[in-house]
Amino acid sequence: MYDIVIIGAGVSGSSIARELSRYNASICVLEKGEDVCSGTTKANSAIVHAGFDAKEGSLMAKLNVQGNAMMEQLSKDLDFPYKNNGSLVICTDESTRPGLNELCERGKKNGVPGVRIIEREELLKMEPNISDEAVAALYAPTGGIVCPFNLNIALAENAYTNGVEFRFNTKVLDVKKQENGYTIVTNNGDVRTKYVVNAAGVYADAIHNMVSENKMKITPRKGEYCLLDKSAGEHVSHTIFALPTKMGKGILVTPTVHGNLLVGPTATDIDNKEGVNTTRAGLDEVISKSAITVKNVPYRQVITSFAGLRAHEEHHEFIIEEVKDAKGFIDCAGIESPGLSASPAIGVMVADLLKEKMNLEEKEHFIATRKGILNPEDLTLEERNELIKKNSAYGNIICRCEMITEGEILDAIHRPLGAKSLDGVKRRTRAGMGRCQAGFCSPRTMEILEREIPGFTMYDVTKSGGDSAIVVGTNKDRV
């Protein structure tokens, strides 16, 4: 029997696992996907919000500001890309200036450092490509951008290094109350535990409803995006928002930590919890509405489009608490935007809650740091040449668009919780994220996966686990 089982290995579940790994407890994370970061966390705006948008006094506002303040040091400790680039909310009509002022006051009440209103002249100096209609903006210097994949992977790897067990391809079918805890029924057998943490993203309602008479409903809110090539990455330098509405923060335009330009998302409530397809109407909306705040976005440089789902609960508030009629069952639900920004603080909050309930004692030798995959681009020419002399794999370019070497892919496969699929390699190294979108490097990456993972053949290599096999037969097979 485990002390704690966490359901879900997204950024919330992995942050909770990492914080709980500070204590002497047996902990297991159950994930229905084949890897961490395979649900809600894999497709979002990659924004570290400053915290001015959430309702004053809400848990969402509190954890957003706390998580924002933690992110820079966490990025240094766990070695993932983060940049404090600041954010701007654009007012394009004097009639809407009261809404901008209200947002500024809310930010100040939420404790957002340095938030202020700037006028058009200062705005143009900061962002020359801002809309000709822009009259003023809310400036939040603590806004940032992050790599959501590396954040999630870093948290999970550090948790694993500190003793947390991860079980992948393990779908929760039922949760049964027992006298001294819970039995979690999965497709890979039963798992017994004293405490449960429900961090299942858009499926958090289904998990909650297995144990509680007070039913919860999570609505998948689809957001569609366009990702532009690195040649467009300097079109803006800050994260640019329109004034928010009840459906969210609108279409944003932002650089990414890797130098691309990201535009989106839409906000459409759907029923399908796996509905991550893009639509013509959605992408048209992204293109048309982005022009409200930023002019001349070079959409001819789009290299891919994608969609993600936000776990929207009707009260638009994080639900982080012990379920009233299910002692020992902790919900971490409704974690929609700014969930990524708040994730470090969410981990601390849930860990503190369980520490108090379980009288957990801190480990004597908690490992607080983690080193990510070596990036040869960070080395001098002399250092890179020396690296290649020691390990020739770092001289073999596999992904030409992103200049990813075989050495980096080998590291991605063999490190803690290593990659087992094309998407697993892509999220850890960016191999396949460039202009050709894996057209060149996929076969070569597949060969490396087959060679390096014991028992793997080409038929076992998938895009993202499950039924996403790449090779289904050989040329001239007879039916």
Image (tube, grey):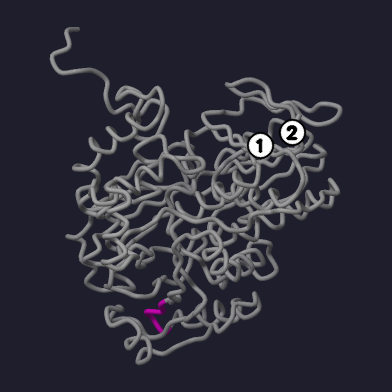
Q: Which mark is residue 28?
A: 1
Callout 1: 10 Å neighbours few (<14), some, many (20+)? many
* Of callouts 2 and 1, the N-terminal one: 2
Where does the image place residue 473, in percent across and percent down from the top left? Answer: 23, 18
Q: Which residues are magenta?
A: 90-94
Label 1: state its secondary structure: strand
Q: Judge by depth and name the residue closer to the eye, 314 or 75.
A: 75
Q: Residue at x 23, y 35 (%)?
A: 443
Give the x, y percent position of residue 309. Answer: 46, 47
Q: Which of the 4 image quarters holds residue 258?
A: bottom left
In the rendered view, tell whether residue 212 sits above or below residue 56.
above
Q: Is residue 313 visible?
A: no
Vertical order, 476 against 45 (above or below) = above
Q: Quadrant of the N terminus?
A: top right
Left or right relative to 464: residue 75: right
| Residue 54 x %, y % | 59, 66
Q: Residue at x 69, y 54 (%)?
A: 366
**Residue type highlighted by circle 1:** Cys
Badge 2 local density, few (<14 within 10 Å), some, or many (20+)? some
Tag 2 and tag 1, C-beta contact below 8 Å: yes
Residue 2: image tag? 2
Secondary structure found at label 2: strand
Instruction: Name the residue located 82 percent from the left edge and 39 percent from the top edge.
Output: 327
